[in-house]
Amino acid sequence: MPHPQVSAVLFDMVRFVPSAENAFIALTVRSRSRSSHTASQDGLMIDSERLYTVATNEVLEPYGKSLTWEIKADLMGRPAHESAARLIAATGIPLSVDELLSTMDKKLDRLFRTVEPLPGVIKLVHHLEKHKVPMAIATGSKKKNFLIKSAHLGHLFDCFSTNILCGDDPILEGKGKPDPTIFIEAAKMLGINTPEERKKVLVFEDGVSGVQAARAAGMEVVWIPDPELLNTLGDHNLDPSHQHSSMEDFDPGAWGLPPYDQ
């Protein structure tokens, strides 16, 4: 069955654990006969998932706890304070939400400075830039954290110029996935304002709540989950438009975007 021809792309950028790091990237494409838009998260773009796990386990270790995939799956895509509260409830560690977030931020500040892009991401972003595809980033990260995370990756994030929406922007009113607000507002940055237009937006996601948010926004969604998340979920009722194991598997031409050069 052929894929829908999309008019925009949104990338969800990070696999969420308790810091305000639930991101996605919105890219707009104008192809020969159709328009296309895209969105994603930095766990899809950069290797932040591993760092979140390292930082979280460093916090949990003194209490004899660890971050399991069952817990992690419940945290992904949620706002920072909600995610932290759920982690505390799941592990019973004697920290307040603010104490946990402060400790995590200090650890992530160090780790973010070494994070690297994941396979296929630079190729896709540079390809869209080459074809003059307008692009924007909409990330659940606080602006401070996003700047730390992206500072050494200018070859990737400079492609988006100043088109960046961070999770602490007042326009989001603290709403996190599965609420669709972050996708809807990112689409508005690209001039996409109506439900009919949002049908031609393609979202890249790795989290359960992100897939739900994209569907709630009326958008197409490509799901690229971690294999461990799939193992944890087992049977599920998610309804992504398509599923890949890596961004390297994505074929832009199949969605009405400029195809890769042969």
Image (spheres, rainbow, N blue to C red):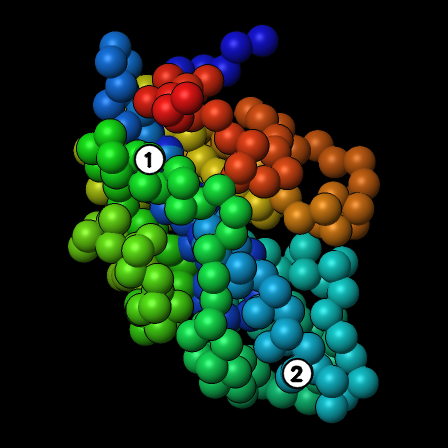
Q: Residues within 10 Å of mark 1 (few under 14, many from 20)?
A: some
- What residue does disc 1 label? 127
Depth check: give the residue in front, 180 or 6.
6
Label 2, secondary structure: give it: helix
Which quarter of the rendering shows the N terminus?
top right
Identify the residue shown where x is 47% and y is 81%. 110
Task: Tell me which amino acid carries mark 2.
Answer: Glu
Q: Is residue 133 left or right of residue 261?
A: left
Residue 235, quarter of picture: top right
Identify the residue shown where x is 20% and y is 33%. 132
Dot 2 or dot 1: first in sequence order is: 2
Cα separation, mark 2 vs mark 1, equals 38 Å
Residue 39 visible? The answer is no
Q: Residues within 10 Å of mark 2 (few under 14, many from 20)?
A: some
- What residue does disc 2 label? 58
Task: Tell me which amino acid carries mark 1.
Answer: His
Q: Which mark is residue 185?
A: none
Q: Is residue 216 left or right of residue 28?
A: right
Q: Is residue 76 left or right of residue 160?
A: right
Q: Give the number of callouts.
A: 2
Residue 201, quarter of picture: top left
| Residue extending furthest toward the front | 262
The location of residue 247, given as percent across then percent down, is 52, 39
Select label 2 or label 1 by which is in front: 1
The location of residue 204, given as percent across then percent down, is 48, 38
Label 1, secondary structure: give it: helix
The location of residue 88, given as percent across then percent down, is 67, 76
Can you say whether 161 is above or below 32 in the image? below
Can you say whether 71 is above or below 84 in the image? above
